[in-house]
Amino acid sequence: MSQGPPRAVLDAWVEGRLEAILTPSIFDEYLRVCDRLRRSYPEADYQAMLTDLLAHGTLVPDVDHDESITADPDDDKFMLCALEAGAVVV
């Protein structure tokens, strides 16, 4: 896995410095992304990471919203999750 921002976020979560909050639709997107990454980085253990995320993250329901709240409607699920959970940082 890279050493950039995604890795820093995962490290912070593992160290307990942040809480992972996700919805079913966000988890589905993570599954799709891991399937794509597996082709380029087959040595990474995506299954273990996703299992840990489900076991130790906080799952909140998807939030229905009629209008887009971000510039990219595909990103709405992340902002709606953050709002639903009362997140301070996204």
Image (cartoon, helix red, strand yellow):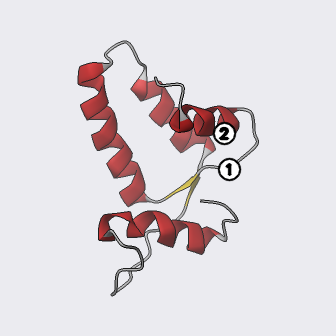
In the image, 30: left or right of 53? left
Q: Could you tell me which residue is drawn at 66 percent across and 39 percent down? A: 13
Using the image as rendered, state which of residue 11 and residue 27 is in the foreground.
11
- Mark 1: give few (<14), some (14-19) or many (20+) Cα within 10 Å: some
Identity, as a three-letter code, of the amino acid under mark 2: Trp
The residue sitting at the bottom extreme is 66
Q: Residue 23, position in %: x, y? A: 46, 60
Number of marks in picture: 2
Identity, as a three-letter code, of the amino acid under mark 1: Glu
In the image, 78: left or right of 87? left
Q: Which mark is residue 13?
A: 2
Instruction: Locate the C terminus and report the quarter of the image it occupies.
Output: bottom right
Q: Secondary structure at mark 1?
A: loop
> Mark 1 highlights which residue?
19
Q: Could you tell me which residue is drawn at 36 percent across and 72 percent down? A: 71
In the rendered view, tell whether residue 85 sits above or below residue 20: below
Q: Could you tell me which residue is drawn at 33 percent across and 34 percent down? A: 34
Q: Secondary structure at mark 2?
A: helix
Answer with the quarter of the image where residue 62 lies.
Answer: bottom left
Q: Are marks 2 and 1 in contact (CB under 8 Å)?
A: yes
Indicate which disc, 2 or 1, sits on the residue closer to the N terminus: 2
Q: Residue 85, position in %: x, y? A: 62, 68
In the rendered view, tell whether residue 88 sits above or below residue 51: below
The residue sitting at the top extreme is 43
Q: Residue 84, position in %: x, y? A: 58, 73
- Mark 2: give few (<14), some (14-19) or many (20+) Cα within 10 Å: some
Answer with the quarter of the image where residue 73 lies.
Answer: bottom left
Q: CA distance from mark 2 to mark 1?
A: 6 Å
In the rendered view, tell whether residue 78 sits above or below residue 28: below
